[in-house]
Structures are given as C-alpha cells and as structure tokens.
Amino acid sequence: MKTHLSEQRVVVHPLKNIEQNSNISFRSRRSFISNAAWAAGAIGLSPMLGSSGTKAEAASTAFGRTRAVQAFEIRRNAALAEFDAPAASHTNNGDEQLYGNKIGNYSKGLPHNSVGEVDLAAYNAYLNAIRSGQPSGFENITLGGTTRD
C-alpha cells in the first residue's frame, strides 16, 4: 500500500491510550478487546480474572513501569550532562622531573634493569616518539622482554 508524504502515522503510547480512553465508554467491541489484550499483556491475566492476592501484583507492575521510565530519564539526563561536560584536565604531578630514574612513570614494554628501573635511553626514545607524533619514531623504541617481530 502506498502512502502519501502528507499522511503521518501517529503512534500513541499504550499507557497514554488507556488514560485517554478511561473516561469514556468503549465505542466498539474491537476497541474493548484491543485495550483488554494490552492490559492483560501489561499486568497479566490473574488480576483481571479477580484472583485473590493479585491486586498488589497489578499495582506493582504499574508502579514498576513508572519506575522504569523514571530510571530511564535519570540515565538519559546523566548521559546528556556528561556529553556536554568539558574534557577533564590532566595535570602533571611532576614525577618525571622529580625522579631521575623514571620509577613512577609508565614504562611497560621497555627494557628494565634487575631492580625494575627503566632503561633511560629506551624511555627517552619513547618520549621522543610521543612528542614527534610520527609512526617511525615508535619503530625506533627498544623494547624489553621477550617479543616477536
């Protein structure tokens, strides 16, 4: 079936649809069955059939749906706030200048001596590669450990 651009499909949320129809009588058997089927799917058949002890279950299902919507809105608002937040600043703690043996700095993959201190020539090659931003600079770093090429 072809539709024209001027025709727009309006989707009504099931909860809002029931709220809108709750003040008026059902106009047809088809609309009654449609709404009853949706309600049965939402809260189960037991409350609708009048089983004892199931009214609280029906109320908790409706509350759970409301709670789920509230939780979604909280998560969405948090994500939007995080998206709009500026990037965190990463301040230098001064360890690179403070410790000549670079003991407090990242040196994974570089050669180390027997007490765990990084080889300074390899560390300086690592810094030079970062500063240059050129891929060839990273190829010139001496790696430690047992690696395969």
Image: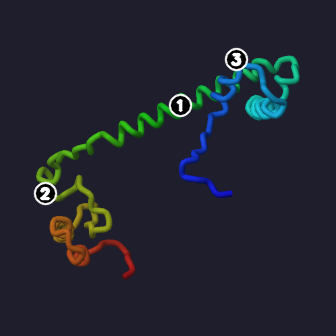
Kindly identify the amino acid type of the residue bearing the numbered disc 3.
Asn
Left or right: residue 5 compared with residue 18: left
Instruction: Name the quarter where the N terminus is drawn.
Output: bottom right
Which element type, helix, strand or loop, lies under badge 2? loop
Give the class, few, some or many, for how many residues have Cα within 10 Å of label 2's Cα (few <14, many ≥20).
few
Q: Which residue is mark 1?
A: 71
Would you identify the image quadrant in which residue 3 lies?
bottom right
**Image position of 36 with respect to 96: above or below:** above
Kindly identify the amino acid type of the residue bearing the numbered disc 2.
Gly
Name the mark on residue 3. Answer: none
**Image position of 124 with respect to 136: above or below:** above
Name the mark on residue 100. Answer: 2
Q: Position of residue 28 (x, y in %)?
A: 81, 29
Of marks 1 and 3, the one in the foreground: 3
Which element type, helix, strand or loop, lies under badge 3? loop
Q: CA distance from mark 1 to mark 2?
A: 51 Å
Q: CA distance from mark 3 to mark 2?
A: 79 Å
Let me know if residue 143 appears in the view. Answer: yes
